[in-house]
Image (spheres, grey):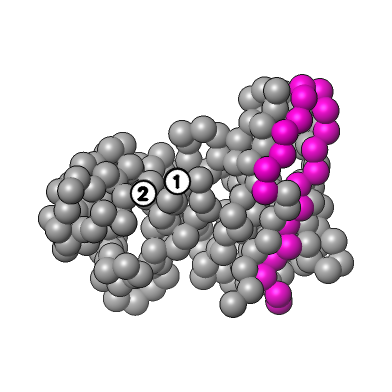
């Protein structure tokens, strides 16, 4: 069965650089969620989209922005990267109403 | 706002012994409840979920959990663990409210199986 695809899987950036993370949801899933998991921490909700519109917003820094495109894939754009942005970024997708969120393998971002 | 408490950050268990990982939640509205497992350097995999109906839910890999509304708990159990169960386990909750389906996770319990 098709799963959530995230790219790239690993990303290394310098401080103050920008990064773009991509998420391709399971076909026919109309909702995408982004989560950030710092080292040794639990995943924290960043932002979600339903039918290409932002549906909820969590603890996402102003330096980050995201959108969902017409083909339902989503991109998380991160600017002015800081050391503290080093984390595993997960994308998940679901149908509405959501009885389960399906997680991608994550993108490991390292900021040097 | 909702919150999840996993009191045990680490649980060591001998192989073939039973295990219970505790989870308590707090929410002002009705919720869905989930347990996810994360193996080292991997993503999150759903073990089981409670949406409605029977309070005892069975999941993959022999795990089960029981929803207790009065105690606001959703403890995870397995009667006999295996080495391959070594992983981080996260309890999570989401509100039954359109537009607020984000998952709120507990801080996780690291299950270590001792041979």
Circles 2 and 1 in contact, beta carbons < 8 Å: yes
Residue toward you, B17 or A96: B17
Above or below B2: residue B97: below
Above or below B16: residue B4: above
Residue A101: image quadrant is bottom right
Give the residues drawn in magenta, as a range. A9-28
Above or below A97: residue A18: above
- Residue matched to label 2: B87
Picture coordinates of residue B100, whole percent (x, y):
60, 56
Say which element carries label 2. Answer: strand
What residue lies at 64% left-to-right and 25% top-to-bottom?
A: A84
Q: Chain of mark 1?
A: B
Picture coordinates of residue B59, whole percent (x, y):
34, 70
| Direction front: furthest residue | B115
What residue lies at 80% left-to-right and 38% top-to-bottom?
A: A19
Say which element carries label 1. Answer: loop
Q: Is residue B73 visible?
A: no
Q: Is residue B56 visible?
A: yes
Residue toward you, A77 or B111: B111
- Residue matched to label 1: B40
Residue toward you, B61 or A50: B61
User: Mark 2 vs mark 1: which is more N-terminal?
Assistant: 1
Picture coordinates of residue A5, whole percent (x, y):
68, 61
Cα distance between the residues tagged 2 and 1? 7 Å
What residue lies at 70% left-to-right and 27% top-to-bottom?
A: A111
Question: Mark 2 Cα within 10 Å, few/some/many (few <14, many 20+)?
Answer: some
Numbered mark located on residue A46 in the image: none
Picture coordinates of residue A75, whole percent (x, y):
79, 51
What residue lies at 59% left-to-right and 77% top-to-bottom?
A: A1
Q: Chain of mark 2?
A: B
């Amino acid at each position: 069965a098709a799963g959530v695809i995230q790219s790239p899987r690993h990303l290394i950036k310098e401080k103050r650089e920008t990064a773009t993370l991509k998420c391709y949801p399971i076909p026919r899933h109309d909702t995408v969620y982004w989560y950030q998991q710092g080292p040794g921490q639990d995943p924290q909700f960043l932002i979600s989209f339903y039918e290409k519109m932002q549906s909820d917003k969590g603890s996402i820094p102003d330096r980050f922005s995201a959108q969902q495109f017409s083909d339902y894939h989503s991109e998380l754009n991160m600017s002015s990267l800081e050391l503290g942005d080093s984390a595993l970024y997960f994308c998940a997708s679901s149908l509405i109403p959501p009885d389960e969120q399906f997680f991608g393998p994550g993108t490991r971002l390292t900021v040097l | 706002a909702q919150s999840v408490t996993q009191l045990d950050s680490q649980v060591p268990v001998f192989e073939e012994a039973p295990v219970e990982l505790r989870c308590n939640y707090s929410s002002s509205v009705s919720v869905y409840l989930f347990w996810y497992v994360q193996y080292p350097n991997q993503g999150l995999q759903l073990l089981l979920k409670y949406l409605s109906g029977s309070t005892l839910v069975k999941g993959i890999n022999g795990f089960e959990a029981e929803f207790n509304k009065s105690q606001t708990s959703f403890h995870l159990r397995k009667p006999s663990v295996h080495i391959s169960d070594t992983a981080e386990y996260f309890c999570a909750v989401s509100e039954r409210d359109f537009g607020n389906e984000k998952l709120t996770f507990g801080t996780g319990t690291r299950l270590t199986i001792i041979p």
